[in-house]
Image: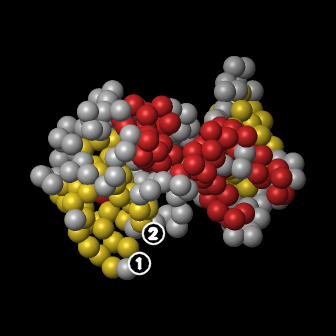
Amino acid sequence: MTYDLVIIGAGISGLTAALSLAQKGVEQVLIVEHQKQPGGFASLYFDSPEFAPEREILQRAAALPYEICTETTIAGFFPGEPHQLYVQSPDGAYMVEAKRILIAAGSLEKPREANRIPGTRPAGVMTPMLAMHLLERGYLPGRQVVLMENGRIAKGAARILEREIGPITCCSADEWELAMIRGTARLESVQMVHKQDQSVQEIECDTLVYAKGRIPNTFFLKGTPVLRDHEGSVIIEETGKTNVPHVFATGSCTCRGDEHHSNSIDLAHEVAAHLFA
């Protein structure tokens, strides 16, 4: 079977585009998602007020008429007429054909290591996503938590952490810069430098929740003709078109997305309007 469209990613961008297409009567659509359920990487924060619009989209997506293949990854992408996707799922590996492809694969948080923060490498330094996964599995990330607040993902994580473990120390990234990490086996303290007066503050802690920037989830495009920038973001036009005919992209995996997923919904509406134009 050849689908009219395969959407790679059932995060907010992919689901928003799917909802728009369903309203227009588009039928032959397949959605591929590598996680166990739709919602994307940011779904861990949907309980917080910062993500109320995304939570509503996820609820509406439950009524989509399209098949959503979860725990399914793209192992190979072969552009052509039609495009071919080699996918791996719990049921095995198989080939899928599609007239159009929409890449909505999202992005991962860029951790301390990728930001080259000086200091040692003790346990207890993690991204907001890792902290949420630990809580989801019944583990406390730590007891003396410092969180760098640099957007709504960090704010959402802070709300959930405070609800689960009590007060934490939040440092605004607009005011403070993480300068040093100290500790041997376990994190002992972090050093913050004030951006205006350059004053230094040493904060004792056993856990640091930190992420700055994003890593586009576009590794499966390596070796394909789809153009990406130096960060790995898919290069797109305003309409979501890539350099490959009938291959579109949207959301935080693109050059027009951002690490806070602040414009993912708008970008998805834009690309949905041009997919079948």
Pointer 2 or 1: first along the chain: 2
Q: Which residue is rendered at x = 50% and y = 36% of the image?
A: 265
Question: Looking at the picture, does residue 106 appear above or below residue 124?
Answer: above
Check if mark 2's residue and mark 1's residue have beta carbons within 8 Å. Answer: yes
Placement of 196 over or under 92, stated as above or below: above
Q: Mark on residue 111?
A: none
Tell me which residue sits at (72%, 20%) in the image.
197
Q: Is residue 122 left or right of residue 10?
A: right
Q: Locate residue 219 relative to residue 140 in the image: left or right.
A: left
Q: Quadrant of residue 98?
A: bottom left
Spot the residue most to the top. 196
- Residue most toward the front? 25
Q: Residue 187, image x and y in percent?
A: 71, 58
Which residue, given by chain and number where applicable, does mark 1 sit on? 90
Task: Give the image location of residue 114, x and y in percent.
Answer: 48, 48
Give the position of the C terminus as an image quadrant.
Answer: top left
Tell me which corner region of the image, top left, top right, bottom left or bottom right, holds residue 54.
top right
Residue shown at 52% from the left, 67% from the top: 36
Residue matched to label 2: 71
224 or 270: nearer the viewer:
270
The kind of residue tagged 2 is Glu
Could you tell me which secondary element the residue under label 1 belongs to? loop
> The residue under label 1 is which amino acid type?
Pro
Task: Give whichever of 18, 101 is nearer the camera.
Answer: 18
Residue 99: percent from left, percent from top: 20, 51
Q: Secondary structure at mark 2?
A: loop
Structural distance between the alpha carbons of marks 2 and 1: 7 Å
Residue 227 found in image quarter:
top left
| Image quadrant where one finds the N terminus | bottom left
